[in-house]
Amino acid sequence: MGLPLPFARAVKRVLPRSLLGRSLLMILVPLVLLQLVALQIYYGSHLNLVYRRLSDSLAGEINFTLALMRRYPGAENRAWIIPLAQNEFDIAMRLEPGAVLHRTGSRVNVLGPMDDDLETALRQRLTERFSMDWTYESGAVLIRVQQPDGVLDILAPRKRVDLGTIWLFVGWMVGTALLLFGIAALFMRNQVRGIRRLADAVEAFGIGRDPGPVRPEGAVEVRRAATAFNRMQERIRRFLAQRTEMLAGVSHDLRTPLTRMRLALAMLPARAEMAADVAELTADVEEMERMVEAYLAFARGEGAEQAEPVNLSAVLEEVAAGARRAGAVVRLDVPEDLTLRLRADAVRRAITNLVDNARRHAHLVVLTAAPAGSRGVQVTVDDDGPGIPPERRESVFRPFESDAAGGTGLGLTIARDIVRAHGGEIVLEDSPLGGLRARIRLPV
């Protein structure tokens, strides 16, 4: 049977979230429970029994002295009874003639069970009224007992009823627990360090950075995970390199027959009846050349460029300037300095593809950038064109999608691939200008 949902949520909010914190909690909770059980066994049974026996012993000695005084009344008998009790029981006694005890019980509660145990023992053995004062002297307790002709003051050392070793025992338990917890925390920190480094390397590799091989350290399982990550990282790099080489080779092989086809079309005799066919073939050849160039651009997007601190504002200004030179109307709204770790050429290519796609279908393009929270930057490309219906927005990211779905060749495919390689995301939305908005979120 599980915990109630509100209680479970409250517990989750209190519990630590890090692996180190939870590991230390798993060590601390059993350690504290063990100390509490040991303290309860020692303090609740053995120590409590010793305290009761000490209190019973002192109460018995006081009762024995009072019994002698009742058996042998008179000042001359008290003259030998009180010194005898002081000498044999190691307690100080004196009689205050004519005094009256107005207050009974203990005047103050002290730390530990000794005051309660002594009061209980005295009530069980004495028939006279009495009071206890634990503040009269720092190392003693003053017990006052009402007598027929005055009040008997008894000053007993605290060591008669107090077992001072409890503080030594508690200090030993707490000190040992802190020492063991500190050693365990040191070892756990060293074990978690390997997991943290592996997590940082995975996150860096996931956003397109090259963390290099992770040094296996820590427990066997952590070493195996680091070794597996290194092998996976190498396989992915090898796959990307092979794909890039393959695409470059395919594009090179395709360019030769395309060049021959273009030359053959150019050398055909100019006949009116063949003009339409030649024009169609020429258009097909140009389309194939654009596809080859798109393949090359896609391959370059997976190159060996490394991420480094880049002024994104400067990159966006270059993209806007290039679009203006191509005849587009571009408004730019970016901060003066917006620096984050990027692969500058790849990001420039991705945003250029988005801006080129917008200017082909619209009259006005607005390019903006701004921080998005503490760990992100948002770049938006707005246009006033016809836009794309919501049900077709995902399909335009497919390579060489047909024009019916807003065909853009590989432009948006390359843009999404680059953004995701940086650990970000790109989505298409309705623009406030009435057209399409491409929103890019990049992590800081």
Image (tube, rainbow, N blue to C red):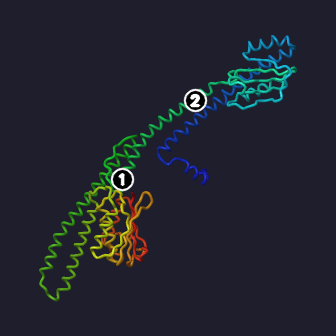
Left or right of 120 in this view: 238:
left
* As drawn, 162 above or below 345: above
Residue in front for this viewpoint, 318 or 214: 318
Q: Amino acid at mark 1?
A: Ala
Q: Residue at x 45, y 60 (%)?
A: 373
Residue placed under numbered mark 2 in the picture: 171
Give the quarter of the image for residue 315. Answer: bottom left
- Crowdedness near tag 2: few (<14), some (14–19) or many (≥20) residues, C-alpha within 10 Å: few
Q: Which image quadrant is residue 114 in?
A: top right
Q: Nearer the viewer, residue 5 or 208?
A: 208
Q: Nearer the viewer, residue 159 or 395?
A: 159
Q: What residue would you read off at disc 1?
A: 204
Disc nearer the start of the sequence (2/1): 2
Closer to the eye: label 2 or 1: 2
Q: Position of residue 75 (x, y in %)?
A: 86, 13
Q: Quadrant location of residue 67?
A: top right
What is the secondary structure assignment of the residue under circle 2? Answer: helix
- Mark identifier at residue 358: none
- Vertical position of residue 280 compared to residue 82: above or below: below
**Residue ID at (86%, 21%):** 98
